[in-house]
Every structure is written in C-alpha cells, then in structure tokens.
Image: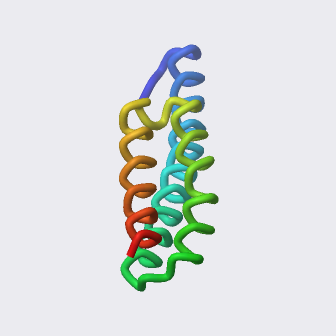
Amino acid sequence: MASHISALKRARQNEKRRVRNLHVETTVKSMVKKVKSAVEAKDAEGAQKALAKAIPLIQRANSQGIYHKNTSSRRISHLTRAVNALKST
C-alpha cells in the first residue's frame, strides 16, 4: 500500500474512478445485451427502442474516456447494422 500522502490520495482517486467506470461499463454491456436479444428474437420494435437507449450510453462512455473512440464507433455500427437488417427482412 502507498505510504506518502500524495500516493494515498492518488489511490483513493483511482478507486473512485474504477468504481465509476465499472458502473458505466456494466450499464453499457446490459443495454448491448438487450439489443442483441431483441435482434435474436426478431423483435424489430424492441430492438429499435433498445438501440436508441444504448447509443447515448456508448457515446457517454467514449466521452468519459472509458472506451476508445474507435471502439464506441464499432459497437454502435455493429448494433445499428443488426437492427437495420431486421427492418429489411
């Protein structure tokens, strides 16, 4: 464990950020699962609604530095393509 005051403070800050980032990541993962399950169930309406909720969460994770910009773009793109494929069929 850290022994200097500044190192102790840094450890506290890192723990706060870790917990905050974990919450955002699990929330995003849950929404992505909802979109994927709706797509697998061929529920176009439900998938569209879940996608509309998932995209802002993914973008927020990107802006907070939890996801890299290419990662967030890739996730949004894959989900959008899956939902749009439901509409066309």
Q: In this rendering, is residue 89 above or below 63?
A: below
The answer to which of 47 and 54 lies nearer the viewer is: 47
Q: Which residue is at 50% across, 82% downward?
A: 43
Percent across and percent down for residue 53 are 63, 59
The answer to which of 65 and 46 lies nearer the viewer is: 46
Q: Which residue is at 50% across, 18% downward?
A: 7
Is residue 7 left or right of 52 when viewed as pictured? left
The answer to which of 34 and 22 lies nearer the viewer is: 34
Q: In this rendering, is residue 80 above or below 60?
A: below
Q: In this rendering, is residue 5 above or below 83?
A: above
Q: Residue furthest front?
A: 88
Q: Tell me how many marks there are.
A: 0
Q: Which residue is at 50% across, 66% downward?
A: 30
Q: In this rendering, is residue 65 above or below 20?
A: above
Q: Residue furthest bottom?
A: 41
Q: Which residue is at 51% across, 15% downward?
A: 4
Percent across and percent down for residue 62 are 52, 35
Percent across and percent down for residue 60 are 60, 40
Percent across and percent down for residue 39 are 42, 75
Q: Which scheme is used to colour this image of the protein?
A: rainbow
The quarter of the picture where the C terminus appears is: bottom left
The quarter of the picture where the N terminus appears is: top left
The answer to which of 49 and 59 lies nearer the viewer is: 49
